[in-house]
Image (cartoon, rainbow, N blue to C red):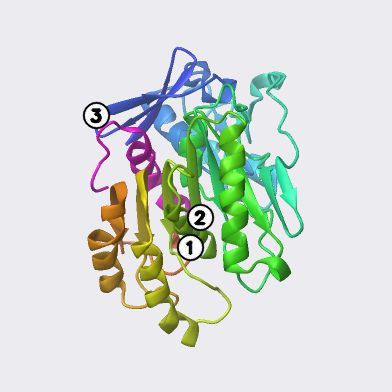
Amino acid sequence: MRLAIAMGFAVLVWAGATVAAGPAFPILDEAGIPHATAKTRAGYAEFLVSGLPRAFAVGSDGSFGGSWGQGSLEVARAKALENCSKAGGIGCAIYAENLDVVWLGERPAQAPAVPDALISGTGYAFVPDPRFLWHGPQAARGIVVWSHGKGKTDERGEQPPSYTRWFNNAGFDVVRFDRAMEWDDKERAAQWLRDGLAALRARGWRMVVAAGQSRGAWNSLQMLDTPGLADVVIAVSPAAQGTDAGNIALRQGPELYTIAQRAHAPQTRVAFVQFAHDPYSDNQDERVDRFRNILFHGVAAGLIIDRPDGFSGHGAGFSSEFGLKYGSCLLHFALDATPPKAC
C-alpha cells in the first residue's frame, strides 16, 4: 500500500489499482518535496493520512521526520524536527504542517474556504470539518458524512478518524454529523441523517458516503431502509448506545438484525467492521453470519473486516494504524468498478 502524487492530482495506489483524486492541493503534490528519496515519499504518504495537528520535516540529505496526534501544532513541529535529526538529517526544516506546505517560509496557497454548518436544526448540524481539505460540491468527487458515537461526553467536534483522509485526499469533502447529547435519540438521529443525506445530494455532491462509529455507525446502517440515500455505508463498531456495557450489549443483536432485514438499497455498498473485545458487540460470529446472509442480500456489495489482528476494543477504528492499514481498502471498496471482497 502506498500513496503517490502525479500531475497535480493525488493518486492512491493499492493492490495494483490506481484512483485519481480531485482538485490539486500543494500538500498533496509529492513532487514538491525537496531532496526526496523513496523512503521520504513513503513517510510522507503516512503523514498525509494522519490526523491533525501534524508536521513533516525534511533534511538536505533526504532524511525526514513526521509527527501527528500531538496536543498542539507547536509540539508536532518540534517532534518532527527532532525525529528528522534523529534519523541523521542535515539542515532539517518543516516542509508541511496540517493542510499546508510551509517550506522555507513559503506562503500557503489560497485554498477554498471551509463553510460553516451546511444544515442545522435543534440538536444537530452537518458541519464541514476544517481539519480536512475542502473541495465544494461542484469540484468534489463526493462527500463523506461522518457520524460520531454517543457516550458519556459530548462528542460534537470530534475529529473524524484517519481512514476518512484517504477519501479526502482522493477528492471527497468530509462533513461531521454533530448531535447534542440531550437530543440524540437513535430514531430521531436516523431521521435527521436521512433528511441530511438527501439534502446534501440535492446540493450537488455526486457520491454520498455515510460513515460512522458506534451509534453513528448504527445510524448509518439505518439509512439502508431507503434506496438512494447513500452510495456507500461504512459502519465501524455499530452500537445502539455507548453509556453502559452491561445489559445494553445483550439487547443490541436482535435490533441490529432487524435493521439488516429492512435493508433495501440495491445500489449501496456496505462495509462492516468489528473488533475483538468490544463490550458493545454481542455474539460477533452471529453478527458476521447475519450480515452476510441477510443484510448483504439487500445491497449492491458487502465487505467485512472482522476482528483484525492487532486491533482491539470498541474504539480501535480511530487509530492511525487502522487508517493506514485499511483506509485504502475502504476507498477502493467505495470506488472500484469491481469492489474488493476482502482487505
Q: Is residue 128 left or right of residue 194?
A: right
In this picture, which residue range is highlighted in magenta?
319-343
Q: Position of residue 164 (x, y in %)?
A: 49, 43
Q: For numbered disc 2, what is the local secondary structure?
A: strand
Between disc 3 and disc 2, the foreground one is: 2
Q: Is residue 267 left or right of residue 101?
A: left
Q: Is residue 106 left or right of residue 313?
A: right
Between disc 3 and disc 1, the foreground one is: 1
Q: Residues within 10 Å of mark 1 (few under 14, many from 20)?
A: many
Front in this rendered view, residue 297 or 155:
297
| First along the sequence among labels 2 and 1 | 2
Q: Is residue 276 visible?
A: yes
Q: Residue at x 46, y 68 (%)?
A: 314
Tags 2 and 1 touching, CB below 8 Å: yes
Q: Residue at x 47, y 21 (%)?
A: 30
Q: Residues within 10 Å of mark 2 (few under 14, many from 20)?
A: many
Which residue lies under the disc numbered 3?
16
| First along the sequence among labels 3 and 1 | 3
Front in this rendered view, residue 231 or 92:
231
Q: Is residue 81 visible?
A: no
Q: Residue at x 42, y 40 (%)?
A: 231
Give the numbered dot on residue 212. 2
Residue 320 sits above or below residue 240 on the image:
above
Q: Residue at x 63, y 69 (%)?
A: 185
Residue 105 sits above or below residue 52 on the image:
above
| First along the sequence among labels 3 and 2 | 3
| Residue at mark 3 to residue at mark 2: CA–CA distance | 28 Å
Which residue lies under the disc numbered 1?
218
Q: Which residue is at the far bottom?
A: 247
